[in-house]
Image (spheres, rainbow, N blue to C red):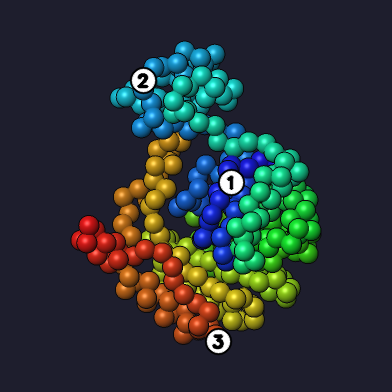
């Protein structure tokens, strides 16, 4: 299987302290993606300017002359780069880094089982991405091993997969963090690159199972942050009697801006500010007005008012 990295002591990927495995490769291409390095299923590389000492060993090591320097930045000609990663191997400071690695289910299990001691009953392992359901066969093998050791398992998914893949993994997981970004199929296609019909249908089916479900809606300026979108999602949940334990409206942040720079990619949200607190409160009220159990709906993340107050205190 292909993974990006393993993040330990996470508190945002399910209950308790968790070890989160980020799988590499995602069928969606969300315009606001906060993990752009996880979209491509292939190995990639990134360059950390702050670590670079300007030795140019990476340029010399490249057999295809794909690297050059311009305005104190190492740039890559993607048409020449064969991803041989000789630039990474030769970098003395770790400024050039490999993104992604191949690992077997057994190897991954051996790595994450080391963290069992700090799960303390409530925590566990979360399989995230990218899209874990794009590598279901390997993920199921790992989940079987973890389940046999009594470890709680969560998956963080876009829901864009055949339902048979969910059916295969359901016996071994305890929680699904399920992204429900946009109600409109046309808007979902435009902003995420795929139609959302299968995503909504899968959620309807999953809600009939016994697994715990946390729905997450990223609130993205000029994309998902309209009252109409939130009302439409809430109506879909109610009309289809979707059973869920939480619905989180997750406020936009731009903490990933450096990731795009390291990948030599532009990001349209680079200079977009945080969402005002009053906007999040209005969206929350709109959702709670429709949902029959409004206490299950909340919003998370830093908002503009809170950020301004934080800066003032500093």
Q: Which residue is under mark 1?
A: 6
The vertical placement of 137 against 90, above or below, is: below
Q: Which residue is under mark 2?
A: 54
Quadrant for the N terminus, please. top right
Q: Which residue is under mark 3?
A: 292
Residue 62, horizontal then vertical, whole percent: 51, 16
Whichever of callouts 1 and 2 sits on the residue coming sooner in the sequence is 1
Secondary element under disc 1, as helix, strand or loop, is: strand
Q: Quadrant of residue 93?
A: top left
Question: Are dots 1 and 2 in contact, CB under 8 Å?
Answer: no
Q: Residue at the far left: name it.
A: 312
What is the CA distance from the residue labelled 1 to the residue labelled 2?
30 Å
Residue 94, horizontal then vertical, whole percent: 47, 28
Instruction: Give me the disc on residue 90.
Output: none
Q: Residues within 10 Å of mark 2 (few under 14, many from 20)?
A: few
The vertical placement of 59 against 96, above or below, is: above
Q: Quadrant of residue 73?
A: top left
Q: In the visual, does 74 lie left or right of 307? A: right
Q: Nearer the viewer, residue 259 or 202?
A: 259
Front of the two marks 1 and 2: 1
Whichever of callouts 2 and 3 sits on the residue coming sooner in the sequence is 2
Secondary element under disc 2, as helix, strand or loop, is: loop
The vertical placement of 237 against 189, above or below, is: below
Residue 178 in view, yes or no:
no
């Amino acid at each position: 299987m292909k993974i990006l990295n393993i993040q330990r002591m996470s508190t945002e990927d399910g209950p308790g302290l968790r070890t989160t495995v980020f799988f590499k490769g995602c069928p969606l291409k969300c315009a606001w993606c906060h993990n752009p390095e996880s979209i491509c299923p292939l190995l990639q590389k990134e360059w950390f300017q702050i670590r670079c000492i300007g030795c140019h060993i990476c340029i010399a090591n490249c057999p295809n002359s794909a690297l050059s320097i311009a305005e104190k930045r190492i740039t890559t000609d993607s048409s020449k780069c064969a991803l041989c990663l000789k630039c990474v191997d030769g970098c003395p400071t770790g400024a050039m880094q490999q993104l992604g690695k191949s690992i077997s289910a057994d190897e991954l299990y051996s790595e994450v089982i080391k963290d069992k001691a700090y799960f303390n009953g409530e925590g566990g392992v979360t399989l995230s991405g990218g899209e874990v359901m794009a590598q279901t066969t390997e993920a199921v093998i790992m989940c079987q091993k973890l389940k046999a050791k009594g470890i709680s398992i969560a998956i963080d998914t876009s829901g864009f997969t055949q339902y048979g893949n969910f059916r295969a993994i359901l016996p071994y997981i305890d929680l699904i963090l399920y992204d429900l970004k946009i109600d409109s199929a046309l808007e979902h296609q435009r902003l995420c690159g795929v139609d959302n019909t299968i995503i909504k249908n899968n959620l309807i089916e999953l809600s009939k199972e016994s697994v715990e479900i946390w729905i997450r809606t990223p609130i993205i300026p000029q994309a998902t942050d309209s009252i109409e979108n939130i009302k439409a999602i809430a109506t879909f949940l109610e009309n289809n009697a979707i059973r869920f334990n939480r619905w989180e409206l997750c406020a936009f942040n731009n903490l990933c801006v450096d990731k795009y720079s390291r990948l030599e990619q532009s990001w349209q949200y680079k200079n977009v500010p945080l969402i005002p607190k009053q906007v999040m409160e209005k969206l929350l009220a709109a959702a709670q007005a429709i949902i029959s159990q409004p206490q299950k709906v909340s919003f998370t993340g830093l908002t503009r008012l809170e950020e301004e107050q934080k800066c003032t205190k500093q």
